Amino acid sequence: MNVDFGKLSGLAPAVVQDYATGRVLMVGFMNEEAFRRTVETGYATFYSRSRGMLWTKGETSGHRLLVKEIATDCDQDALLLRVEPLGPGVCHNGYRSCFYRRLEDGRWVEFEPPVYDPEAVYGKKRP
């Protein structure tokens, strides 16, 4: 379990992919403790750069990520988590994936509808 956390000030990017569909759901960052907790619990845990703390996906929303497989890249400084999403969406804005916009004619366009109301889940509008 040698992941190189030294290149990004103790963090490694973690791409999260739906195990069943292959769709990329989100990108987070892990430090050694988040990685260890993910391996131990089987649920995706990340390090929040903005809050300076660990967080397990779904601890507020209930939309957890059950880890099915963890892979690393050739340099062992980035991670791929293949997960089973437990809930309607992964994005805190109410979408199935955080990647719900695509570039069309120089503009970002939402290409799918939200799958849940984030205000009902989080109690307030999120940035």
Image: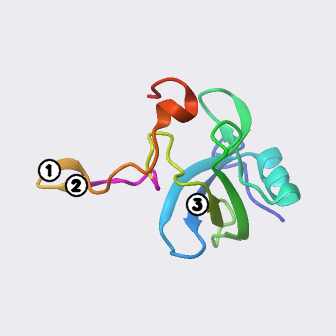
Residue underneath mark 3: 16
User: Is disc 1 placed on a helix, strand or loop?
Assistant: loop
Closest to the observer, 79 or 92: 92
Question: What amino acid is found at the position of numbered circle 1 in the picture?
Answer: Gly
Give, as a single range, the part of the protein colored magenta. 96-103
For mark 3, does the 10 Å Cα neighbourhood hold few (<14), some (14 to 19), or many (20 or more) residues?
A: many
Q: Residue 1 lies in what quarter of the image?
A: bottom right
Name which of mark 3 and mark 2 comes first in the sequence: 3
Name which of mark 1 and mark 3 comes first in the sequence: 3
Q: Which mark is residue 92?
A: none
C-beta proximity under 8 Å, tags 1 and 2: yes
Query: In the displayed image of the protein, which residue is found farthest to the top?
Result: 124
Which image quadrant: the C terminus? top left
- The answer to if 97 sits in the magenta stretch is yes
x, y (%) of residue 113?
Answer: 33, 52
Q: Which mark is residue 103?
A: 2
